[in-house]
Amino acid sequence: MSLDISFIGILIGSIMASSVPLILAASGELITERSGVLNLGVEGMMIIGAISGFALMVITDNLFIAIVGSMLSGVIISLIFGFLTQSLLTNHVATGLALTIFGIGLSAMLGKNFVGIPGKEFPILFSSLRESIPFFGPILFGHSIVLYFAFALPFLTNYFLKKTKLGLVVRAVGDSPVSASNQGINVILVRYCCILYGGAMCGLAGAYLSLIYTPQWIENMTAGRGWIALALVVFATWSPIKVLIGALIFGGITILQLHMQAIGFRIPVQFLSALPYLMTIIVLVVISRDSRKIKLNTPTSLGRIFYREK
Amino acid sequence: MIKIEKRNDVPMALYFFTPFIAIVLTILGGGIIFYILGFNPIEALKFYFITPISNLYGFSELLLKATPLCLIAIGLSFCFKSNNWNIGAEGQLTFGAIVGGGVALLFYNQEGFYILPLVIIAGAIGGMFFAIIPAILKTYFNTNEILVSLMLVYVSKLLLDYLVVGPWSNPEGFNFPETRQFSDSSRMPLLFEGLRIHAGIFLALGAVMLSWFILYKTYLGFQIKVSGLSLKTAKYAGFKGKTMILVVFMISGACAGLAGVGEITGPIGQLHRMISPDYGFTAIIVAFLGRLNPFGIIFASLVVALTYLGAETAQIFLQIPKYTGQVFQGMILFFLLASDYLLFFKVKILNLKKNELRH
C-alpha cells in the first residue's frame, strides 16, 4: 500500500511538471487578452523561446543567461506582433497566425546546428526532502525554480489584476479602450506592454520544455502546447486561478495517457492523445453556452482594433 | 516631416497592388536572413525562387503544390469574407482524405470508371462533415470557431495515425504506417507522361469559377459579403445568420476535403501519416494574399507553392531545413498585413523646403 501512495505522489509531481509550460504561456496570454489583444502566436513565441533558450545554454553554458535570453527572445518576437497590430492596426487573428507560422519556421532554421546535442541537467531544489518524505516529497520538492515560479504566477496574476492600480488599467483598456483613453491612459502603450509580457512568458514556457522538461532541441517540440494554452485562457474564462486548475487537468491527461500506455491499457494511444483536444472542445461548449457566464470576465474589446485620430 | 491621414475610402488599385509590395519585401527580407546565416543572398534566393521552376518538371511540381493550396484557399475565402475564422482546414483536409481514402481502400482490388468519382465525393463529404462541427458549435452553443476548428486538426491527424498503424494498415506492408496502394481506378489521371501534375488541377480551377459565380452573381454571395462588412446590417436586412455560417463552413470543408483527396489519389496513392505539409494552414496565407478574390487566389497559390518548392531546393543545395518555407510564408503575411496600412491611411511626405524657408 505504501508503494501505491508514493507512486501517486510521483504521479502528481509529474503532472505538475507537465502543466508548467501551459500555466506560463496561458498566464502570459491571459494578461495580453485582458488588455483586449488576441495573440494567436503563442505556439510561435514558445518555440522561439525553446530554441533560443537551448542555443544560449549550449553557447554560454550558463542556464541563467539561457532562461533570461529565452524570455527576451519571446519579447522580441512578440514585438513584431505588437508593432503590426498596435501601430499598423492589422487584424489580430491573421497576425497571430503569421507569427506562429513564422516562429516555427525560424526556430527550425536557427536550431539546425543544435539537433542531437544533449541538454544540461537543470538544478532542482530541495532534492533531499523529495526522497525523505513519502507522499508529499515528490509533490512539493525536487522541482526546478521555474516550476515554483509557474505555480505562484496565477496567484500573482490574480493579485495584479484585482488589487493593483496597474491591473485596473489593464482591465480598463481591455474592457473599454475609449473611456480608458479619455481618462488619459495611453491605450496603445498599455497594450504593447501586455503583448511583450505575454511574449516573455511564452518564451519562458518554451525554454522550460527545451531546458528542463525534455532537455534537448527537437524541431517543432512545443507540439501544439501553445494552442492548448490559448484554449486554456478561454477555458478559464480569463480567470488566472482557473488557468492553474485547467493546466493541471490537461497536464494530468497527458501524464495519465503515458501511464495507461505503459500499463498496456487497451485503448489505442491516439485516442488518449486526442483527449486533451476533445476535452478543450467540450469545455468550450459548456462554458460558452451560458453567454452571461462567459461575458463576466471576457475583455469586451478582445481582438478589436483601437484607433484614435490624433 | 511625415504626416499620416486617414483615407475616406480604400483605393481599389492599391488594394490589389499591395500583395506585390508584400512579395518584394518578403524576398528582400529572405535575402537578409540568408545573409545573416552566412549564405550569398543572391545565390540563395536564386536557388529558392528560380531554380525550382527552371524546367518543365519543376513547373509541373509548382502546379501540383498550388492545386491543394488554391482549392483550400477558395473555400476559406467564403469563411473569411463572412467573418468566420475557420483555421482548421488542415483537419478538414485530413478527414476528407480519411473518408475518401477509406472508399478507395474498399475498392483496392477493383477497377471501374465509377470509383474515382465516388472517392472524390466521399472526400468532399468528409471535409464538409468535419467543418460543420465548429459551425454547429458556433451557431448553437456560441463556441469560438477558431479554437474548435484548430483542436479538430489534432484530432483528425491522430485518427489518421491510428488508422494507418492500426485497422487500415497494409497487411502485406511489414508494419509500415501506411495503407495498401489504391487501385489505378482510384487515382487521378496524370495530364502528361512523366510529370506528376494530375487532373485534380481541374477541381481547383472549377472551384475558382464556381466561387466567383457564387460570390459575385448569387444572393448567397451577397449575404456573405454584407455579413462580412457588418453583422448588424446583415441582421437588419433579415439574413439568416445561422444558415449562412453553416453553408460557408460546409463549402470551406468540402474544398479542403477535395484537396485532401486530390493529394492521396494524385501524387501519394495511399494513406500514410504525412499526407499534407500543412497545406491547410498555409492556405490561410494564400487566401489573404489573393485578397479573398478567386482569381487573386490562383496567383497567390502559385507564389506560395513556390516557397514550398524553394524550401526543398534550398534544403538540397544549401542544407538548410525545409522549414525555411514557413519563414517566407510567415513573412509574406506579415508584410501583406503591414502594407494594408497604406490602404487605410495616407502617408504624406511634407515638403521640407517650406520649413527651411522659415529659418
Image (tube, rainbow, N blue to C red):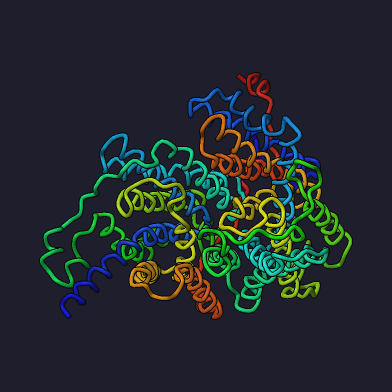
Q: Quadrant of residue A19?
A: bottom left
Q: Is residue B142 left or right of residue A268?
A: right
Q: Residue at x 60, y 61 (%)?
A: B179
Q: Quadrant of the C terminus of chain B?
A: top right
**Relative vertical location of residue A82 with respect to residue B82 in this rendering, above or below:** above
The answer to which of A87 and B20 lies nearer the viewer is B20
* Residue furthest to the right: B217
Residue A305: image location, x then y, percent:
60, 55
Q: Position of residue B178 (x, y in %)?
A: 57, 59
Q: On screen, A198 above or below B123?
A: above
Q: Whole-percent x and y of residue A258?
A: 36, 67
Q: In this view of the protein, which residue sits in the foreground, B124 or A44?
A: B124
Q: Quadrant of the N terminus of chain B?
A: top right
Task: Tell me if A9 is positioned left or right of A232 in this view.
Answer: left
Q: Farthest residue in the front direction?
A: B172
* Numbered-mark total: 0
In this orientation, which residue lies closer to the viewer: B284 or A220? A220
Residue A185 seen in the figure: no
Is residue B151 visible in this depiction of the protein?
yes
Residue B224 position in % (x across, y down): 78, 64
Would you say A198 lies left or right of A36 here?
A: left
Q: Quadrant of residue B230?
A: bottom right
